[in-house]
Image (cartoon, coloured by chain):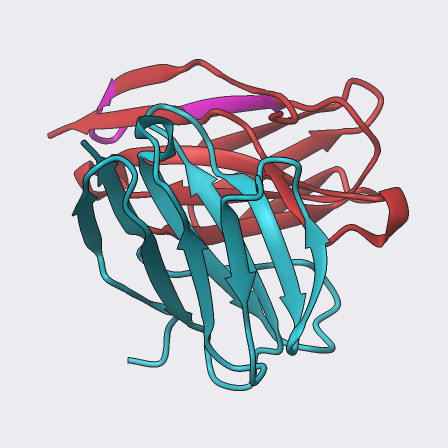
Chain colours: A cyan, B red
Amino acid sequence: DTGVSQDPRHKITKRGQNVTFRCDPISEHNRLYWYRQTLGQGPEFLTYFQNEAQLEKSRLLSDRFSAERPKGSFSTLEIQRTEQGDSAMYLCASRPQGAKVNEQFFGPGTRLTVL
Amino acid sequence: SQQGEEDPQALSIQEGENATMNCSYKTSINNLQWYRQNSGRGLVHLILIRSNEREKHSGRLRVTLDTSKKSSSLLITASRAADTASYFCATALTQGGSEKLVFGKGTKLTVNP
């Protein structure tokens, strides 16, 4: 399977715990995106990487959230001191360098439930 | 905040009928895209229309774009039960080189066999 992969697919945690999600983009896609989707809503942009550089961050990305892409390949999204409001689907997407339009390829998502 | 709204929020039709979904947005765009999401899964790109295009076709899909009204429509012809999913429009903005896509709230389509 050469699509975007995300791990884990589901995560249940207690309030106050830290969680980390991983995203592996399509090989040779240098642009990587994180979105959050709550029930009944469309995805909302969180952050964007070009290679290892984090170039764009949403105001939704509070100081409890941190994303990294240290080698320009996979990315991690960490949420510290989780709150019930963090319960959502976290989606990762990627796209190749040089693409003429901003068509993004999405992974299956990680569903987070904070109890 | 979300860019705009899809209309209707939910649509239920019989197999073989056509389904039309509308999307409105608020700011200037480079292009508008439609994505499909099956229940609890990731999004699949369906079709993209550039801001200088008015209509585009792909298989059973037809997309229109009216930049003066800041609106788009997605028509699925001869629907199938497998088309049951949520459909989202997403806009790529012109401002400041932003890479983000801004999604609407989606239309939940149910095609009954």
Q: Main secondary structure of the magenta part?
A: strand
Is A41 situated above or below B82? Answer: above
| Residue B20 drawn in magenta | yes
Residue sitting at the far right: B96
Read off the magenta span.
Answer: B13-23
Q: Is residue B61 left or right of residue B19?
A: right
Identify the residue shown where x is 35% and y is 23%.
A40
How many numbered badges does the structure rendering display?
Answer: 0
Q: Position of residue A24 (x, y in %)?
A: 40, 74
Q: Position of residue B96 (x, y in %)?
A: 88, 48
Q: Is residue A35 left or right of residue A107?
A: right
Q: Quadrant of residue A32?
A: bottom right
Question: Could one spot residue B108 in this view of the protein?
Answer: yes
Q: Position of residue A79 (x, y in %)?
A: 41, 49
Is A99 situated above or below B6? Answer: below
Identify the residue shown where x is 48% and y is 51%.
B46
Image quarter in which the N terminus of chain A is found? bottom left
Is B72 situated above or below B35? Answer: above
Identify the residue shown where x is 60% and y is 59%.
A103
Q: Position of residue A23 (x, y in %)?
A: 40, 68
Q: Quadrant of residue B4?
A: top right
The residue closer to the viewer here, A39 or A63, is A63
Residue sitting at the far left: B113
Identify the residue shown where x is 57% and y is 46%.
A46
Image quarter in which the C terminus of chain A is found? top left
Question: Could one spot residue B77 in this view of the protein?
Answer: no
Q: Quadrant of residue B40?
A: top left
